[in-house]
């Protein structure tokens, strides 16, 4: 069986982050929009909270069974939760994994081409291209529609669907025929990223995008991803405040920079 992306990322950060076993979790905030994790190193990580899915899965008054136990534990222990199929665990696990990944990226920054600005600036679109967007990322829709032949938007969460947006059951049909595939970073946390990348294997360009896409980029590059448009946390205090107060991406812009990673060398699968 092929190793899952989160499993490979965990293995790599353990190897790349010095004294990783000594790092602990200082603070966790399970916010309405995003979940934030602060490490004892001062680094922070984000992951979309999936509020609707967690609420539907919870049968009692406590949202997270980990509540009251996370601060102070080894960071790698909480990062292991990124492998969980319980969404309330995986979001804190991925946020922690993203924080550890920030350290690994900083120490190996020469491996990447780091580009500033909107990830769409680095995706080549023509009127011949069919684009599939997994995740209803509305700010990206107008510029894509202006440049591409057609755009399919696929969304898992019913409350985020609107006219013309397809349910995620359409992925198996749409992704294999797309020339360009854009995938929300939240697919890492809900466990769908591996299957989505398998479906998109024939696409000419694949990008994983969003504040949740803070995972070590090379594990995505190995699976055919060309661009990873993630977030570099620049002010962890501000990030944790925004998350704790229910903020989303617009408010988080004051605490992070959006950066796009490309591999400097071809990554072999």
Image (cartoon, grey):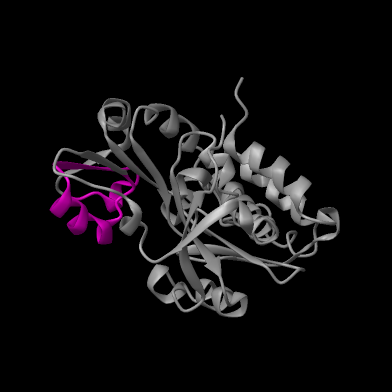
Magenta region includes residue 149: yes
User: Which quadrant is home to the N terminus?
Assistant: top right
User: Which quadrant is home to the C terminus?
Assistant: top right
Magenta region includes residue 51: no
Residue 256 placement (x, y as % from top left): 50, 72
Q: In this view of the protein, can residue 198 be seen by the observer?
A: yes
Q: Residue at x 67, y 59 (%)?
A: 67
Considering depth in this image, is 127 or 97 the residue closer to the camera?
Answer: 127
Side of 203 relative to 114 (left or right)? left
Considering depth in this image, is 241 or 59 the residue closer to the camera?
Answer: 241
Residue 200 placement (x, y as % from top left): 37, 31
Image quadrant in which you'd find residue 33: bottom left
Residue 260 placement (x, y as % from top left): 45, 58
Image quadrant in which you'd find residue 137: bottom left
Q: Residue at x 52, y 40 (%)?
A: 221
Considering depth in this image, is 55 or 264 the residue closer to the camera?
Answer: 264
Asked if residue 80 is positioned above or below residue 233 in the image, the reply reads: above
Give the total of numbered labels: 0
Q: In this view of the protein, can residue 56 be seen by the observer?
A: no
Q: Residue at x 67, y 55 (%)?
A: 108
- Magenta stretch in the rendered image: 134-162
């Amino acid at each position: 069986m092929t190793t899952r992306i989160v499993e490979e990322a965990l293995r790599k950060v353990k190897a790349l982050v010095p004294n990783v076993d000594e790092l602990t979790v200082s603070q966790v905030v399970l916010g309405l929009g995003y979940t934030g994790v602060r490490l004892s190193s001062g680094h922070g990580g984000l992951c979309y909270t999936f509020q609707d899915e967690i609420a539907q899965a919870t049968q009692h008054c406590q949202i997270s069974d980990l509540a009251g136990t996370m601060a102070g534990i080894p960071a790698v222990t909480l990062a292991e939760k990124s492998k969980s199929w319980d969404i309330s665990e995986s979001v804190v696990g991925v946020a922690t994994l993203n924080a550890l990944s920030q350290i690994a990226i900083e120490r190996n920054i020469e491996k990447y081409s780091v580009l500033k600005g909107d990830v769409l600036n680095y995706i080549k679109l023509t009127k011949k291209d069919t684009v599939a967007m997994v995740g209803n990322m509305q700010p990206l829709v107008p510029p894509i529609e202006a440049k591409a032949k057609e755009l399919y938007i696929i969304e898992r969460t019913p409350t985020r669907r609107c006219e013309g947006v397809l349910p995620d059951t359409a992925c198996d049909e749409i992704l294999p025929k797309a020339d360009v595939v854009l995938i929300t970073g939240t697919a890492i946390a809900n466990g769908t990223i591996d299957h989505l990348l398998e479906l998109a294997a024939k696409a000419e360009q694949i990008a994983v995008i969003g504040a949740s896409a803070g995972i070590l980029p090379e594990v995505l590059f190995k699976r055919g991803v060309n661009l990873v448009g993630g977030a570099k946390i620049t002010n962890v205090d501000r990030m944790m405040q925004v998350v704790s107060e229910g903020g989303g991406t617009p408010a988080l812009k004051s605490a992070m920079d959006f950066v796009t990673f490309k591999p400097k060398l071809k990554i072999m699968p």
